Structure formats: structure tokens, C-alpha cells
Amino acid sequence: MKRKINILIPIFAILVLVYVVRSILGPRIQTESLRRVSMEEVVSTKGIMVKYESVIDPGILGALEPSVQEGARVSVGQEVAAVYSGRVDTETKNQLEQVNKKIEQIEKNQANLFSFSNDVSRLEQKITEQTAVLVEKSMAGDLLGAGEAQLVIEMLCEKKAQITGDGAAGNLIEELKAKKKSLEARAGAATRRLYARTAGVFSTAVDGLETVVTPYNMMELTPSAVTELLARNSKEEGESDKVACKIMQNFRYFVAINVPAESVETVKIDDTAGLRFYDLSGDIVPVKILYISPEEEGQKTVIVEGNRYLESLLKRRLVNLEFVKGRHEGYRVSVESLRTKDDVTGVYVRRENMLKFIPVEILYNTEEVVIVASKDEQTPLRLYDEVVVRADSYEEGKLLR
């Protein structure tokens, strides 16, 4: 019996040694955790805004006094500005601008007052609501919002006074129009009044490029022409003393950009892309590719069409932007984790401590990173899978120590 025990001891020792050696010399692997990401194909560049623009140029010198606010929507035949002979002092000009803003705000709100009819209780409720808004805007330092709330309160109080017969209710808008006439008289008689020939958005930002690059000739742009326009002053020489304004179509605009030729090798006319005007918003504005110029010194001019509204975008001519050619969502893996098995591209993952090959579809790749999706629904990738980046050997189903 003692002899049998003596024989078993070295056998057990040998087995332990073999196990330890296999553990040390067995397959060693490096893995990464699988996670979902989105990646963009982006080119940072500058662009030229191209719009349908109707310039109203009186052809005379003087002081231009807008009748509507910058960015306001106007209709055909609406008065948009007046030109005054001589020079208008800054204080008078500022007062005129404020009065015009108040008149416009009141006219916007007058339609809402009709819905209250002669209901005093509803008027009082609205006055209370607007008073709360006034306090909130004032405490937040929003002077513009506070001023608008104050105007609404004045109109509501005037309406209430007219209904109840309390005091001699004055007509606020008439008082403002009378004040406007007085200020205009101080500024001098209007030499000419300007009216909108088309409907759209009003602007005084006339830069001289309205007739240089238009939707009708933009397809002639080349990379060198766009570079020249980008370097051009915002106002043409000799136009600083002229007065003019314009009306822009507000639901359609174009942007001309220069990009490296290789970045648009796979892009075609009518493809969709995106622009991010990062000075204005972090959102991506969807656009359609309208034109791609011939290559010139490694550059191509791309013209896109957009219609999504962004605050103050139409006022600009030169814009900083990111051209988002594509956006890809999927699983992120390292390029070195890709493997080929039976002419199928995939990755090895660690499951139940064994290697398993998962076929994948490559959606997008860089030099270091690949965005992939599962190619076979029967063997899909799973979030947080351990993807094998490196291993001493790849043998599916082999137990990993």
C-alpha cells in the first residue's frame, strides 16, 4: 500500500507541473471592450453664402432709416426703409430705431388682443402673466425681453381702460407714430421711401456681392474663384457712403465651399450631406449636393443647397463650417483586431472563455479605427463583447486560460 502511495505522489506532481506550464505557456490575448459609437467624415472649411437677393438701392446719399427690424419678414410692397437727406445725429437715429421696433411689436400683438374681446377678467389674467414675465426677464438681465413684456402690458392696460371707461385711455400706437413723425421731422424730410419688391427677409447687410455671385451664375465657381471671394473685403470699394438694403428669400440658400479633391471622390450630385455652422449652432443642417467643380490644384468647389433656418445665418456672407460628408454609427474596433477566416472578414471575441469568430461588415474606417456592424444575425456582435486585438494563436472554440 505504501508503495502505491509512493508511485502516486510523483504522478500527481507531474500533473500539477504540466497544468502550471500550460497555464504559463497557453494562449495569451489582448482584448478591448466593444462599444457603440458614431463617427463623422468631416472637412473643416469656410463657405460663401449664395442667396436669392433683391437689393433696394435708391442711388442717392443720405441716412438710411429702416422701418422694420433686421431679419424681419416683409411682404411685397411693404415699406422697409426711408432715406433722409443730410446727416442724422446718433441720438435721433437710435430713438427712431427704438420707436420703429415698438410700433412693429405692437402691430404683431394687436391681432392677439382681438381674441380677448371685452373680457376684462381675461385681460387682467394676461396682465398678471405678463407682469411675471417682465419681472423674470428683468432679473435675468434680458432687457429686450423685458421691453417687449412692458409693451404688451401697456397695450393690455389700454384695452382694459377702453372697456371699463377708467380715465382717458390714450392710443399707444398713435402716440408712438406721432413721436416717429416728430423724430423724422428733426432728422429732416425723407428724400425717398423704400418698398419691398419681393417677399422675404429684410437686411441692411449689403456687401456688394449680391450681384457678383448669385444662384444663376454660381455653377461657374472654381476653387480659385471661391478663394478670391473669401479673401475679398465685406464691402466693395467706394460703396461706404451709399445707402441700400435688401430682401432675401428665406427658405432656400446655397453654400459654396472648397474641399480637398480626395474627400469628395465618392460624392455625387444629388447626394445628401450635412453642414455644421459651429459659430451659430452645434446641429447638423442637412443639405443636398448641387455641383462639384473640376479639380484645381488638389481642390474642388462643392455647392450645396439648404433650407433649414438658423438664427442670423442669412445675414452672413462668409461662414465657418464643417462639411459632414457622412455619419456612421456602429461598433468601434481597432484595425488590428480585424481577421479573415475562409475569405470572410470578422473579429474574434472572448465568450465563455473561448474564442468565437464573428463576421462583420465594415461601415467606415480610418488608419487606426473601424466602425463595423454584425454581418450575420445568427452570430451577432454584442455590446461590451471582449474583442481580441492580439493573441498568440487563433483557434475557434479553444479554451483560454
Image: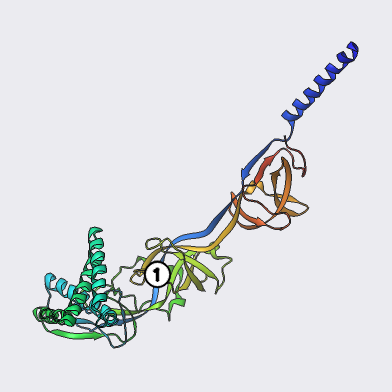
Specify the quadrant of the image occupied by residue 318.
bottom left
Left or right side of 111 for 261: right
Q: Work out whether residue 78 or residue 399 is closer to the camera in this orientation and state it.
A: 399
Q: Where is residue 278 in the image (x, y as percent from the top left)?
A: 40, 61
In the rendered image, the vertical position of residue 25 relative to residue 284, given as above or below: above
In the rendered image, the vertical position of residue 399 relative to residue 253, given as above or below: above
Q: Can residue 83 be seen in this view?
A: no
Query: What is the three-letter code of the residue carrying label 1?
Result: Ile
User: Considering the numbered disc 1 on the image, is that residue within a helix, a strand or a loop?
Assistant: strand
Q: Where is residue 67 in the image (x, y as percent from the top left)?
A: 22, 79
In the rendered image, the vertical position of residue 21 relative to residue 90, given as above or below: above
Q: Where is residue 107 in the image (x, y as percent from the top left)?
A: 25, 80
Q: Are there few (<14), some (14-19), or many (20+) residues within 10 Å of tag 1? A: many
Q: Is residue 400 visible?
A: yes
Specify the quadrant of the image occupied by residue 180.
bottom left
- Screen quadrant of the C terminus: top right
Outermost residue on the bottom side: it is 77
Q: Work out whether residue 217 or residue 150 is closer to the camera in this orientation and state it.
A: 150
Specify the quadrant of the image occupied by residue 105.
bottom left
User: Image point 10% across, 79% down: which residue?
Assistant: 167
Left or right side of 363 for 290: left
Q: Where is residue 366 in the image (x, y as percent from the top left)?
A: 58, 53
Q: Name the residue under label 1.
A: 48
